[in-house]
Image: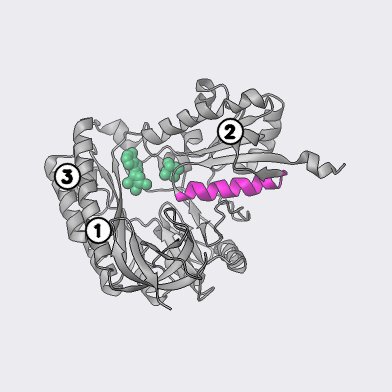
């Protein structure tokens, strides 16, 4: 009998939250592949189920708790099944997860994934395994992630970890620790490997990419972005996320210089009111933000701008809310992620301010914000009708097998008849129609 086949175990991993978590799940998969785990997409056949969790809002945590209740039934059929909680919730609640849910065997924070093999040994002996130690150095720089998204077109590359910003509402500095940058050589090596494997797009990830700095040779984020862009004329490069206070002219220059650096800037405003921004400790004003947007648009007229907005933050008045709506119109965002404020234990806001906006007011304000953004998104797409865009094809359209979908450099989704094209191709598409979410068109031959 083949001995190695006996040793193979199956890992099912489910990921919640941000792109950084997706990237972390790929690092975890790489670590466990070395321990003879094979990835499965069926929890019922797994020997190990891992849930990579998010704590950003209360409802993210509630979803995970519900999911854990569902997954626990697999233990009935497989007595050896182990269940682990990874990521931000593991870091935030730590061993309390084990008290609340006895079916959980393993709790591992974002900086402790290298310890997984050792923890799994502990767990196989019937003891619970916990490591939530945060690190000042860990960047998993030497680990080649196992790509879990099978489209083979676009990949996330983590360039830094943690966050030093301490925005008043945000749990991330507590769950992901201090900011640290990854050695640029290892980033470039990872991107080169992706190019060799045929990938066409990378997204450089960090909680605040603009503060990337490799101190040994003073490589800052624009330097890194340029080095990545120079690796290939057919590799699209995106990045996420920028903090408005740190986005530099140097970055704008580098973005303008390379066609392959995608012309989308995601710049979370959070609120259009200076009073709220100050209480949020965002360290910029509405005016300085708008100046950045003008500079970006002046250098790159074709750029799209997207944002994150929190409504109903502590003390937000009706005037503050109107400031947000006005700012949205003034910028004319192409896209936005919009949220109700959710108090997170341990944050500055939770300690110092009252979460005093009634739920129904938060809901009403959020609905107004969403309604406005739908209109702005539609206007942004209507402007594209009649224009031709280069689209990188990501796969088949969900609605029709006769259509493909891809994205423009501006990160807008385009659906078009497939003809002879295939995933990973670049194609010129003329836009003929749109909804607020998608562009429609046909390829130009
Ligand atoms: N409540 C609501 N939204 C939040 N975000 C971060 N913390 C909170 C919170 N406590 C939003 C911000 C951030 C995005 C990733 O999530 O808009 O940019
Ligand atoms: Fe969620 Fe933030 Fe953690 Fe990402 S970093 S998983 S968004 S809490």
Residue shown at 26% from the left, 73% from the top: 298
Res. 12 mark: none
Label 3 sits on residue: 321
As drawn, 66 above or below 179: above
Res. 77 image quadrant: top right
Residue 410 seen from this side: yes
As drawn, 191 above or below 58: below
Res. 8 image quadrant: top right
6 vs 431, left or right, is right
Residue shown at 47% from the left, 43% from the top: 177
Query: Mark 1 or mark 2, which has the lower sequence index?
Result: 2
Residue shown at 39% from the left, 55% from the top: 241
Q: Position of residue 437 (x, y in %)?
A: 32, 55
Q: Position of residue 141 (x, y in %)?
A: 59, 55
Res. 267 image quadrant: bottom left
Numbered disc 2: secondary structure: strand
Label 1 sits on residue: 378
Residue 357 seen from this side: no
Q: Is label 2 in contact with label 3 (beta carbons under 8 Å)?
A: no
Which contiguous range is marked in magenta? 19-36
The quadrant of the rendered image in which ligand 2 is seen is top left
Q: Residues within 10 Å of mark 1 (few under 14, many from 20)?
A: some
Disc 2 residue: CB within 8 Å of ligand 2: no
Label 2 sits on residue: 84
Numbered disc 1: secondary structure: helix
Of marks 3 and 1, the one in the foreground: 1
């Amino acid at each position: 009998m083949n001995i190695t086949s006996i040793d193979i175990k199956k890992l099912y991993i489910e990921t919640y939250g941000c792109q950084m978590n997706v990237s972390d799940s790929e690092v975890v998969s790489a670590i466990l592949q070395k321990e003879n785990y094979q990835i499965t997409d069926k929890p019922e056949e797994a020997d190990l189920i891992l849930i990579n969790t998010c704590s950003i809002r209360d409802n993210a945590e509630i979803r995970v708790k519900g999911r854990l209740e569902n997954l626990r039934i697999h233990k009935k059929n497989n007595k050896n099944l182990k269940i682990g909680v990874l990521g931000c919730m593991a870091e935030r609640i730590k061993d309390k997860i084990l008290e609340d849910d006895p079916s959980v065997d393993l709790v591992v924070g974002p900086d402790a994934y290298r310890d997984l093999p050792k923890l799994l040994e502990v767990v196989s002996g019937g003891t619970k395994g916990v490591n939530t130690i945060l690190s000042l150095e860990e960047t998993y720089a030497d680990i080649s992630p196992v790509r879990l998204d099978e489209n083979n077109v676009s990949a996330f590359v983590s360039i830094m970890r943690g966050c030093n910003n301490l925005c008043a509402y945000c749990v991330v500095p507590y769950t992901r620790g201090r900011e640290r940058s990854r050695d640029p050589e290892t980033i470039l090596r990872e991107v080169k490997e992706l190019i060799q494997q045929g990938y066409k797009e990378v997204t450089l990830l960090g909680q605040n990419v603009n503060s990337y700095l490799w101190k040994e040779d003073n490589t800052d984020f624009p330097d890194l972005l340029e080095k990545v862009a120079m690796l290939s004329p057919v590799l699209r490069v995106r990045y996420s996320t920028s903090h408005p206070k740190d986005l530099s002219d140097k970055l704008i220059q580098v973005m303008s210089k390379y066609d392959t650096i995608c012309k989308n800037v995601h710049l979370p405003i959070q609120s259009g009111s200076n009073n709220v921004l100050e209480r949020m400790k965002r360290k910029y004003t509405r005016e300085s933000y708008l100046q950045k947007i003008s500079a970006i648009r002046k250098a790159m007229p074709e750029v799209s701008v997207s944002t994150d907005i929190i409504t109903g933050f502590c003390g937000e008045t009706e005037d503050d809310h109107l400031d947000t709506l006005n700012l949205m119109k003034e910028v004319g965002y192409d896209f936005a992620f919009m949220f109700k404020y959710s108090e997170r234990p341990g944050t500055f806001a939770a300690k110092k301010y009252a979460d005093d906006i009634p739920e129904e007011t938060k809901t009403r304000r959020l609905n107004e914000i969403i309604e406005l953004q739908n209109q702005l998104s539609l206007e942004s797409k209507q402007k594209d009708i009649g224009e031709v865009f280069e689209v990188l094809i990501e796969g088949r359209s969900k609605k029709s097998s006769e259509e493909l979908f891809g994205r423009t450099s501006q990160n807008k989704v385009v659906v078009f008849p497939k003809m002879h094209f295939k995933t990973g191709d670049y194609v010129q598409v003329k836009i003929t129609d749109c909804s607020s979410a998608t562009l429609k068109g046909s390829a130009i031959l």
